[in-house]
Amino acid sequence: MIAEPPALACHGLTLAYTADPVVRHLTLEVGAGETVALLGPSGSGKSTLLHAVAGFIRPTAGEIAISGRVVATAQRAEPPERRSVGMVFQHYALWPHMTALETVAFPFQRSGMPRPDARREAAKLLELMGLGRLSARPPSELSGGEQQRIGLARALARRAALYLFDEPTAHLDVPLRAALQEELAEQRTRTGAAAVHATHDVAEALAVADRVALLREGQLVQVGTPSEVYQEPVDRWAASLTGPASILDVIVERVE
Ligand code: ADP
Ligand code: MG
């Protein structure tokens, strides 16, 4: 049997907007069907990394492969529409002229589904996410949290081998946040898709992920299961990021 290629493989990836890179020599693999949480403080490079995987930023060095196919190097990068990824942006961009239903139906239609079926599927997805009563509204008549969930429904409507979530619960109240995390977990079991889930929220990272990757100033500090990163942080920074840390100064008097 041939092993399935990783859903995502970044090797020696360097990403820069200016001369000073934001992500440096990053190597990370996400297995088929695996969810990896990208956990790091604001400004650590999470969005930049996801944008590069989705195809909006070209690497300065290194490469990105999706399902075993190289999609980006410094020399050559495929455009976003050629990559089989569904992305939920931190700053959601909904189409202003479309209602919630049309927005979510669009990816179904694009994949070749007849319009009535696409609308039915979209209605089901909106219902599932507690948005059924908002289907006829355009984005201007929706709150930030509602827009975020429509963006998420639109991404889920696009069947992808890899989903990228950029702080998807940032605009949600706590109870909704938990419901959404459950929905994501269900979706993942149903479709077997892989995901990278960027967040600065430790609880969320530990709850949603098979593995957690700690990002600090564009470099991976530790990658491990939630219990590994929580119980065995590699350094003081990792310890204070993943939980309330009691740091004790010790004097080593003798090593036996
Ligand atoms: P995160 O998502 O973890 O908060 P970002 O990837 O948004 O981090 O940002 C990482 C770094 O890159 C920050 O220092 C930010 O100021 C910088 N940065 C982000 N976008 C741009 C841009 N379009 N031009 C220049 N610098 C940027
Ligand atoms: Mg960000």
Image: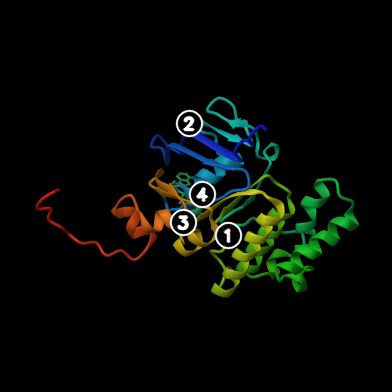
Q: Amino acid at mark 4?
A: Ser
Q: Nearer the viewer, residue 146 or 155?
A: 155
Provide the secondary structure element on which disc 3 rests: helix
User: Of the residues tagged 2 and 3, which is closer to the observer?
Assistant: 3
Residue 212 in sight here? yes
Q: Position of residue 135 (x, y in %)?
A: 78, 68
Identified at 10% across, 50% down, the residue is 254
Characterize the local packing of mark 3: few (<14), some (14-19) or many (20 or more) Cα atoms within 10 angstroms.
many
Give the CA separation, mark 1 to mark 4.
12 Å
Assess mark 1: CB under 8 A from ligand 2? Answer: no
Amino acid type at image mark 3: Pro
Kindly identify which residue carries mark 2: 60
Q: Taking 242 as reference, is 123 left or right? A: right
CA separation in Å, label 4 and label 3: 21 Å
Instruction: Look at mark 3 in the image and give the residue it sits on.
Output: 226
| Location of mark 1 (residue) | 168
The mark nearer the N terminus, 4 or 2, is: 4
Residue type indicated by callout 1: Pro
Q: Quadrant of the N terminus?
A: top right
Q: Quadrant of residue 228?
A: bottom left
User: What residue is at 62 percent from the left and 69 percent from the top?
Assistant: 179
Front residue of this view, candidates 90 and 38:
38
Please state the horizontal and vertical placement of residue 91, each as a whole percent of the image.
57, 56
The vertical placement of 38 against 146, above or below, is above
Question: Label 4 belongs to which residue?
Answer: 47
**Residue behind label 3 places its C-beta within 8 angstroms of ligand 1:** no
Q: Ligand 2 closer than 8 Å to the CB at disc 4?
A: yes
**Closer to the N terminus: mark 4 or mark 3?**
4
SS type, badge 1: loop
The CA distance from mark 3 to mark 1 is 19 Å
Cα separation, mark 4 vs mark 2, equals: 16 Å
